[in-house]
């Protein structure tokens, strides 16, 4: 089956710890994206990558880091510098550059 | 930068009625406008999109219209069914490969 997988579905961490969220796609898409969703809000872009070994900051990149070593994978690290990390994190990918397809999301809770 | 406003924030209709959700955008350079449906606890699902060289697009019970002059676009759902109940998001993109800018969503409730 082709698609985008995110793991884990739920993640719990203590304040001050870094945590890495996984995103994998087997759609052969070049571009991948990370968005953050807060209750009652739209999605906001954290980082995106159009090709391997290259990525760009989105509107809310502070406190986050990414890597793109393989076309299929785009992990997101939420660092201790992120002031409000509790949120629903969504990964997306795109072949054409406009149509973006989303994974199932990871709900991160930091206490 | 681009800003997308979406209205209404909540919409309740009876099964079989039509539902209309409207969005406005600020950047006239935006050229791609998708609509997503998100069910509780899941990722958004692309349901229909329109590009700036087209005024209207239909897919069975759903349609999207675009008015470039007024910088607004709308989602129309006809013959609504309970399974249409979800949060719907509009979005706009200025340049392919970059960010989608999302509206804040509309919670649609269809009662039978």
Image (cartoon, grey):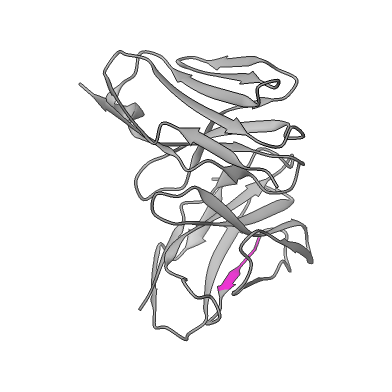
Give the side of residue A72 with respect to residue B9, left or right: right
Q: A26 above or below B73? A: below
**Residue A65 pos. (x, y %):** 64, 73
Query: In terms of depth relative to the viewer, which is nearer, B52 or B37?
Result: B52
Q: How many marks?
A: 0
Q: Position of residue B62 (x, y in %)?
A: 48, 19
Q: Residue at x 55, y 66 (%)?
A: A22
Q: Is residue A2 visible?
A: no
Residue A110 screen position, x and y as percent: 39, 75
Position in image of residue A14 (x %, y %): 39, 83
Quadrant that contains the C terminus of chain A: bottom left
**Residue visible at 53% across and 69% down in the picture:** A21
- Residues drawn in magenta: A73-77
Q: Main secondary structure of the magenta part?
A: loop
Left or right: B88 in relation to B15: right
Residue drawn at x 47%, y 71% is: A85
Which one is nearer the viewer's eye here, A32 or B26?
B26
- Is residue B56 visible in the rendered structure shown here? yes
Residue B86 vertical placement versus A57 (above, below): above
- Which residue occupies the foreground of this view, A57 or B28? B28
In this picture, residue B50 sits left or right of residue A110: right
Question: Is A75 within the magenta?
Answer: yes
Q: Quadrant of residue A101?
A: top right
Magenta span has B103? no
Quadrant placement of the N terminus of chain A: top right
- Residue at the image point whose x is 61% and y is 63% from the top: A60
Q: Relative to residue A65, is residue B62 depicted above or below?
A: above
Q: Is residue A65 placed above or below A32 in the rendered structure?
A: below
Residue B37, quarter of picture: top left
The single residue placed furthest to the bottom in the displayed view is A16
């Amino acid at each position: 089956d082709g698609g985008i997988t995110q793991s884990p579905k739920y993640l719990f961490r203590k304040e001050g710890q870094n945590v890495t969220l996984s995103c994998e796609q087997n759609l052969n898409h070049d571009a991948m994206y990370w968005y953050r969703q807060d209750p009652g809000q739209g999605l906001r872009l954290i980082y995106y990558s159009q090709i391997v070994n290259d990525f760009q900051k989105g509107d809310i990149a502070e406190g986050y880091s990414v890597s793109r070593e393989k076309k299929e994978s785009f992990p997101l690290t939420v660092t201790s510098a992120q002031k409000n990390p509790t949120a629903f994190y969504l990964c997306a990918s795109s072949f054409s550059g406009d149509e973006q397809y989303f994974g199932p999301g990871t709900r991160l809770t930091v206490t | 930068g681009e800003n997308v406003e979406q209205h209404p924030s909540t919409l309740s209709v009876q099964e079989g009625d039509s539902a209309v959700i409207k969005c406005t955008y600020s950047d006239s350079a935006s050229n791609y406008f998708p609509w997503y449906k998100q069910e509780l606890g899941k990722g958004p699902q692309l349901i229909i999109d329109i590009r700036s060289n087209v005024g209207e697009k239909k897919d069975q019970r759903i349609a999207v219209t675009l008015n470039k002059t007024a910088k607004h676009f709308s989602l129309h759902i006809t013959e609504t069914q309970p399974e249409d109940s979800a949060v719907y998001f509009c979005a706009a993109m200025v340049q392919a490969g970059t960010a989608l800018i999302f509206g804040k969503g509309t919670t649609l409730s269809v009662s039978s």
